[in-house]
Image (cartoon, rainbow, N blue to C red):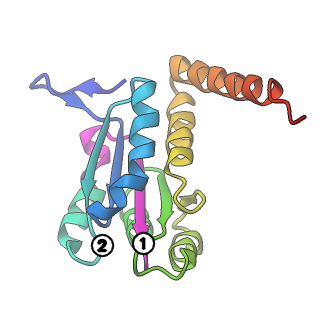
């Protein structure tokens, strides 16, 4: 679902960024979900604390490179989603990650969730990168009928799965 640039290279529709490569096992769920629907993704480590210049450059230019949605995962102090949202005109979906230095993930959740007015970050549950992928697909589907139908079909399939479950 990505477009191509003037050199014929595929351009990603969704960027998945994370503060550390140790976040990838969580964030991969978003990439896998989007890949199932043909949505092109770029994934990279962009640390708000260790590579602030890279983060600023990435966030300020993502829209001009054809990115439509940014999914940003971070653990601990989790500044990445909010800092990116402060710079980019694109929607940012934050994924709080329960990291090794985390306080049960609460520090990440609150760091991403409690954004000031004017700098929104859509925040999903702790380690819920798949939900971030679903939300990104819904955002893309608001302007793409094929992707919107994919969301409709996905929700119908979830309903079918629930209705066929028996507990006794």
Residue segment shown in magenta = 60-79
Task: Tell me if residue 33 can be seen.
Answer: yes
Label 1 sits on residue: 99
Q: Dot 2, how many residues are within 10 Å of its Cα: few (below 14), some (14-19), or many (20+)?
A: many
Q: Position of residue 102 (x, y in %)?
A: 46, 79
For this rendering, which residue is in front, 14 or 163? Answer: 163
Residue 41 sits inside the magenta stretch: no
Check the image and name the residue furthest to the front: 168
Q: Which residue is drawn at 32% across and 27% down?
A: 2
For residue 23, side relative to residue 57 (left or right): right
Q: Is mark 1 on a helix, strand or loop?
A: loop
Q: Quadrant of the N terminus?
A: top left
Label 2 sits on residue: 48
How many marks can you see?
2
Q: Position of residue 40 (x, y in %)?
A: 33, 31
For this rendering, which residue is in front, 148 or 128? Answer: 128
Whether pointer 1 and pointer 2 mark residues with C-beta atoms closer than 8 Å, the reply is no
Q: In which quarter of the image is the C terminus?
A: top right
| Residue 77 vertical placement versus 162 (above, below) | below
| Residue 63 vertical placement versus 108 (above, below) | above
For residue 166, side relative to residue 64 (left or right): right
Q: Residue at x 42, y 72 (%)?
A: 99
């Amino acid at each position: 679902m990505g477009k191509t640039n003037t050199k014929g290279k595929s351009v990603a529709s969704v960027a998945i960024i994370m503060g550390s490569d140790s976040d990838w096992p969580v964030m991969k769920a978003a990439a896998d979900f989007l890949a199932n629907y043909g949505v092109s993704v770029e994934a990279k480590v962009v640390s708000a604390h260790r590579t602030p210049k890279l983060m600023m450059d990435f966030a300020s230019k993502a829209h001009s490179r054809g990115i439509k949605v940014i999914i940003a995962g971070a653990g601990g102090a989790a500044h990445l989603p909010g800092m990116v949202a402060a710079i980019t005109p694109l929607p940012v979906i934050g994924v709080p990650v329960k990291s090794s230095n985390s306080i049960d993930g609460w520090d990440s959740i609150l760091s991403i969730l409690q954004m000031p007015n004017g700098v929104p970050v859509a925040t999903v549950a702790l380690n819920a990168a798949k939900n971030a992928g679903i939300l990104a697909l819904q955002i893309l589907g608001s302007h793409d009928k094929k992707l919107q139908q994919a969301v409709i079909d996905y929700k119908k399939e979830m309903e079918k799965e629930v209705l066929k479950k028996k507990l006794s």
